[in-house]
Image (cartoon, grey):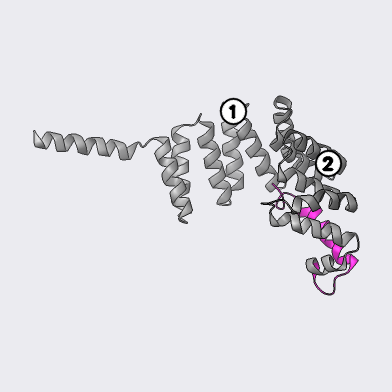
Amino acid sequence: MLLSACSLVSGETSRGLRDPDAGSRLRVAAAAEASGQADLALSLYAAAAEAEPRNAELQARFAGALSRAGNAAEAQAVLQRALQANPNDPALINQLGRLQLRNGQAQEALGSFDRLIARRATDAAALDGRGIALDMLGRHPEAQASYRSALAASPAAIGPANNLGLSLLLSGRFDEARSVLEPLARRPGAPPRVATNLAIARAALGDQAAMRELVGERASQADLDALLRELGAQGLAASRS
């Protein structure tokens, strides 16, 4: 009887090891990632996602892990497959749009956010993402309207306000940018990029101390112009969200 009991326990343990539940996999994956074991975390996320292909949250977590590991194309493929099973899932659509922004796919990202806004017109995250995509396409007035809509839906959100300030900078509306960014920079929890954007606005308006802080003692207007061009060409998605 003792041998039978041992055999039963052993079998149950074996089955548990072969087929843990999704929650267990995710908890262990998160712990592995936090401790720097990225490869182990990724394999656990992959196993969880494979076990439950229709679980939108699992697919999103797997895609996020792939993106953090630098596998952007594979992360997009995971999200697109997940959207075939969950075509209207807002979290999946938003995550796909954000990934497309980071990959410089502004037109594709705009399509993703428009798809979400068509169903959820006051989705602040989608309106913010749409603004970023429009800015990346050089459509600054439309971008600013989208940020203002995001702020109407979520007045306390720092991201859309900062992005509005940056968009105003990119369109040469420096005084308006400063008026948006100054109160934002005073808010508790404002990220460092808000202060950087405010310094750019001040420098553009002739504040030499702000210009030196940004680009050094020998700063010139040409240096500031180069900084603004670089923000417009490459820095949009990285400096936001």
Q: Is residue 203 above or below residue 113?
A: below
Q: Name which quarter of the figure residue 12 lies in.
A: top left
Quadrant containing the N terminus in the rendered view: top left
Q: Which residue is mark 1?
A: 84
Q: Is residue 239 visible?
A: yes
The percent coordinates of residue 75 (x first, y second) are 58, 43
Pinpoint residue 80: horizontal percent, then vertical percent: 61, 34
119, 148: nearer the viewer: 148
> Is 150 above or below relative to 173?
above
Q: Is residue 41 left or right of residue 66?
A: left
The answer to if 221 sits in the magenta stretch is yes
The residue at the point 90 percent across, 59 percent down is 205
Give, as a three-letter code, the residue at label 2: Gln
**Magenta residues?**
215-241
Q: Residue 83: percent from the left, percent from the top?
A: 60, 30
Please name the residue that numbered disc 2 is placed on.
144
Q: Which of the two labelled residues, at mark 2 and mark 1, occupies the earlier sequence position?
A: 1
Outermost residue, bottom side:
217
> What amino acid is labelled 1 in the image?
Gln
Whether residue 41 is in magenta: the answer is no
